[in-house]
Image (cartoon, grey):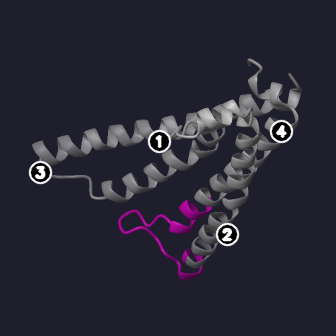
Amino acid sequence: MTPIIQLVRRASALPVIVACIALFILMAMTFCDVILRSVFNAPIEAATELTRILMAILVFSVLPIVSTTNGHIAVDLTDGFFHRLHLSRARDVVIYVVSGIMLFWPVQRVWVLAERARDYGDVTEYLSIPTYLIGWFITLSVAITALVMIATGLLKAFAPNTLSEPM
C-alpha cells in the first residue's frame, strides 16, 4: 500500500474521534438536562443551542468517511443491471466524481452564509458562540468530502486495488 493511502487511512480516525466526543458530550448533557429538569425543575438553559452545535459537529465530521465508504443508505434497484453488463465500477466512478463536483455548490453557499453571519456578528442566544464558526466547520467538512469523493472516484477508475487493500 502506498504511504499516502496509509496516511489518509490513519488520518481518517480523527473525524471519527471528534464525532465520538461530540456524541458523548451530547449524551451526558442530555442526561444531566433531564435529571436537572425532572428533579430540581432547573433545566440547562443552553441545552438546545448546544444540541444543535453538537449535532452539526457529529454529522459533518464523519461526512467524508461515510461518503467514501458507502455508508449512506442505498437503494439497489439497478445493481443487477450494472453487474450483468460489468459496469458497476464505471457507475461508481461516475457517481463519486459527479457527487464530489456537485458538493462544491453547498460549500460555496454555506461559506457565503457563514461570512454573512460573521459580518452581522451573529452569536448563539445563551452562550454567545459566534455562529460563523459552525458555518466554517460545515464548509470545511463538506469541502473535504467533495475532494475525498473525487479522489475516491479517480482511484476507483485508475487504481481500484488501492482502495481494497487492508490497513
Q: Residue 10: x, y in percent?
A: 72, 28
Instruction: Tell me, yes or no, whether the two marked residues, 3 and 2, touch with CB atoms within 8 Å.
Output: no
Q: Examine the structure image and report whether residue 122 is included in the region drawn in magenta.
A: yes
Which residue is at 57% across, 64% downward? 135
Q: Residue 117: x, y in percent?
A: 54, 75
Residue tagged by mark 4? Answer: 157
Q: Identity of the amino acid at label 3? A: Asn
Q: Quadrant of the N terminus?
A: top right
Q: CA distance from mark 3 to mark 2?
A: 44 Å
Q: CA distance from mark 1 to mark 3?
A: 26 Å
Q: Secondary structure at mark 4?
A: helix
Q: CA distance from mark 2 to mark 1?
A: 25 Å
Image depth: mark 1 or mark 4 in front: 4
Q: Secondary structure at mark 1?
A: helix
Q: Quadrant of the C terminus?
A: top right
Residue tagged by mark 3? Answer: 41
Specify the farthest residue to the top: 166
Q: Quadrant of residue 35?
A: top left
User: Sequence order check: which comes first, mark 2 or mark 1?
Assistant: 1
Residue tagged by mark 2? Answer: 108
User: Sequence order check: which comes first, mark 4 or mark 2?
Assistant: 2
Residue tagged by mark 1? Answer: 22
**Residue 35 versus residue 103: which sits nearer the camera?**
103
Q: CA distance from mark 4 to mark 3?
A: 59 Å
Which residue is at 60% across, 68% downward? 110
Q: Identity of the amino acid at label 4? A: Ala
User: Sequence order check: which comes first, mark 1 or mark 4?
Assistant: 1
Q: Secondary structure at mark 2?
A: helix
Numbered range of the magenta stretch: 117-136
Q: Is residue 62 above or below residue 53?
A: above
Mark 1, other Cα within 10 Å: few <14 / some 14–19 / many ≥20 = many
